[in-house]
Image (cartoon, helix red, strand yellow):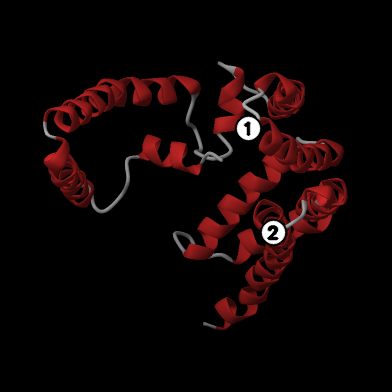
Amino acid sequence: MSSTVEKAPAVQALKDRLYDINALNSAGAIFDWDQQCFMPPGGAEARSHHTSILGRMAHDTLVADETARLIEEAAKAAAPGSVEEALVRVTRRNYDLATKIPSSLVAEKLRLAAIAHEEWVVARKANDFKSFAPTLEKMFEICRQEAEHLGYKGHIYDALLDQYEEGATKNDAEAMFTTVRQPLVDLVADERSTTRSSPATGRSRSSARLQRRSSRRSASTSSAGGRTPRRTRSVRAGR
């Protein structure tokens, strides 16, 4: 018992470090939310620097030598099979991935994302994709660089998807979308047919059918222990 008490501070020290990182990321998320909801368009340039700086600070805190030391100390203190051991494992993985990516790339990705959002809003309203395409290509290039830093064995997208769903690959995503494609096409066709044949009642019948299908999916999920299928979670996680 005394040994557990003595080792507990090591795990708490790692948690405190993660709290600091989370606070920086949360502040950045609030900036992002404010930009999309309230910020005047003219503030994009300044906001891009704010989010870039916060993101760089969070990244630098995560990849610092102090974080590595805390991970190792917590690993010694965490009991096998415990929540604390899982915390150390996930944190170590996040640390290993983050150390492969330069802080400058992290900062530039966040800066450009803030600028790109405002350009997208204008282009979308004008239905003018061409005006937004150059900035979008810059975002793609940053993601390509990120993937190259992370490394991959198969497709370049594997490196990016792995950050959201460990071990998932482009082939996994394609297989999932192939599975759901035809049912979704059939569903849309069915709804359109019903609405055309019975405009007055089509909506209520459509809603009833969708509810039944939703119930069946919920029942299927429950029978699997309440867990969403692994590959589906990876798509939901992607931003």
Q: Amino acid at mark 1?
A: Arg
Q: Residue at x 49, y 38 (%)?
A: 165
Q: Position of residue 62 (x, y in %)?
A: 75, 53
> Residue at label 2?
38
Callout 2: helix, strand or loop? loop
As drawn, is 20 to the left or to the right of 1? right
Vertically, is 187 above or below 58?
above
Q: Residue at x 41, y 42 (%)?
A: 233
Q: Position of residue 236 (x, y in %)?
A: 45, 42
> Residue at label 1?
124
Q: Residue at x 57, y 16 (%)?
A: 155
Q: Quadrant of residue 122?
A: top right
Query: Which of marks 1 and 2 precedes in the sequence?
Result: 2
Q: What numbered label is drawn on residue 77? A: none
The foreground one among 25 and 204 is 204
Vertically, is 174 above or below 2?
above
As drawn, is 95 to the left or to the right of 50? left
As drawn, is 63 to the left or to the right of 194? right
Q: Quadrant of residue 145?
A: top right
Vertically, is 85 above or below 189?
below
Q: Position of residue 27 (x, y in %)?
A: 73, 62
Picture mark count: 2
Q: Amino acid at mark 2?
A: Phe
Badge 1: few (under 14), some or many (20 or more) residues near its Cα, within 10 Å?
A: few
Q: Quadrant of residue 125?
A: top right
The foreground one among 121 and 4 is 121
Callout 1: helix, strand or loop? helix
Residue 56 visible from this viewpoint: no
Q: Residue furthest front?
A: 200
- Mark 2 and mark 1: Cα distance apart in space: 18 Å
Residue 127 visible from this viewpoint: yes
Q: Residue at x 18, y 32 (%)?
A: 195
